[in-house]
Structure formats: structure tokens, C-alpha cells
Image (cartoon, grey):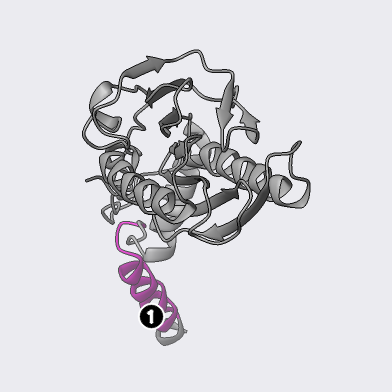
Amino acid sequence: MRAHVAVVLSVFLVAGCSGGDGSVEDSPSATASTTAAESTATGEPAPSSEETTATEEPAPTEPPASVRLDLTDDVMLGPDELEPVGESRGSTDQAETWFLSSACSVPAAPEAVAVQTVSQGLYESTDPVGLQTVAVFPDAETASAVADRVRAAMDACVETPPGDSGSYSVEDVAVGTQGRGLANNYAELGDQGAGSYAAVTRRGNAVTIVAMLSGEESVGNARDAVTSGLTTAFDKLCSYDSAGC
């Protein structure tokens, strides 16, 4: 009987020693439970032990290049650049019509934010008159639409010549963007016949028309003078080009 009691006592003593002070050591699951409980109690997520990776903000983009909207005398053909050289010169910013020949024209574009027309020569004489118009628009898209309008007016003169003004023909001009020329033969056909010539082109948000009208100049000579003037005019409009000068 004593031996049996001793065995039972030994069992209880061993059980008591294994329990120690009755506390439970921390474990990963216990820690997670505690953290979750803290989050629920405060209503805010518990801080993470891992460092937060900073979000990189996109690099600022460059603002679009500004569009030139003013019109100054230095971008117009000078007295020695517009034929006929040496003739009396006039200028206006109120022209309501852009002449493509003495009888063919196109209404001035109301979309223009600035416009100027210069002339050299006298309409009363038999000598030719040189004309240049420069019109500046809010953007290149508007300028392109206006240049197309001028080209369409040239085509209309060919299809339906106005009055008894002779015959007309159009041709592409390899100057700038949308270059087009209109020849007007008064009577005799061909470059040797008397007549006039006008051409249009665009650079950026600016459109220019150069013409040699009236007089007894041959179409061939008028074409050469206008094409030369148009080339110079295109170069002088580089400040309206997004690519610059």
C-alpha cells in the first residue's frame, strides 16, 4: 500500500515540476494574435517591422514651346527683296482681300491674330505690282486650314476664270509646307505670254502669299520673281516654326 502511494506521489511531483510557475512562453502564433488584437482595439493597422518603399513621383514634363503670335516688320520682305525693287511701297494691316491675280482673290482669314500686307509699285502704271501678305494664327492647325483655303481659291480660278481675265493654271511650289502657285496668262499661253503669278506657303503658324500682278511682265519672269521672294519669305518666318531658326 505504501509503495502504491509513493508511486502516485511521484507522478504528481513530476507533473508539478514540469508546469514550473504555470506561465506559457511566447510563440509566433501568440505574437500574431496579440498584434491582431491590438489592431482591432485601436482601429488602426499595427506598424510593420519592414521598411515602407517610397513611391517615386514622375519627373515633371517640359511645358510646350510657346507659339509666336506677334508680327513685326523684320519678318516681311524688305524693299530690296520684293519685286519690283525701287518702286513706291505701301503697307496695311486692314486688307479685307488677299489678291492672287488682278481678278482672282480670297477673303482675308478672320482667324488671323495678326496680318500685314505690303505692296511695291503703282496700279496706275503698266509696270507690275509686287505684293506680300503674312498672316499669323493661334496654332499651326489653323494656319494649315487657311493655307488649304487659299489653295482651293487658286483651283477655283482655274475651273471658273473670273470675267475676261484670261486663263489660269496651278502648280506645286517646292517652298515650305503646302506651297502652291497660280499663273494667270492674259492672252497668250506659256511662260512668254504676259501675265501674273502668285504663290502661297506656310511655316508653323504663319501663312504668306507673294505675288506679282498687273503690268506687262511675262508669266515666266513673274514666276521667277515670286518664287525667289517666297523662298526668302519662308526663311524669314522661321520664328513661327516649332523647330526654330
* Quadrant in the picture for residue 6: bottom left
Number of other residues with Cα within 10 Å of mark 1, as a class: few under 14, some 14 to 19, many 20 or more: few
Work out whether residue 31 or residue 192 is closer to the camera in this orientation and state it: 192
Q: What is the x, y in percent for residue 148?
A: 61, 46
Q: Is residue 100 left or right of residue 30?
A: right
Q: Residue at x 35, y 39 (%)?
A: 64
| Relative height, residue 52 to residue 116 (above, below) | below
Residue 7 belongs to the span the image colors magenta:
yes
| Relative height, residue 6 to residue 16 (above, below) | below
Q: Tag 1, which secondary structure? A: helix
Q: What is the x, y in percent for residue 208?
A: 43, 38
Q: Is residue 204 left or right of residue 105?
A: left
* Quadrant in the picture for residue 30: bottom left
| Relative height, residue 165 to residue 114 (above, below) | below
Q: Main secondary structure of the magenta part?
A: helix
Residue type, label 1? Ala
Work out whether residue 209 or residue 182 is closer to the camera in this orientation and state it: 182
Work out whether residue 125 or residue 201 is closer to the camera in this orientation and state it: 125
Q: What is the x, y in percent for residue 100?
A: 56, 38
Work out whether residue 192 or residue 63 is closer to the camera in this orientation and state it: 192
Q: Residue at x 55, y 43 (%)?
A: 147
Q: What is the x, y in percent for residue 29?
A: 44, 64
Name the residue that disc number 1 marks.
6
Residue 89 belongs to the span the image colors magenta:
no
Q: Residue at x 40, y 86 (%)?
A: 3
Q: Residue at x 31, y 19 (%)?
A: 88
For the magenta stretch, what is the residue range? Answer: 5-22
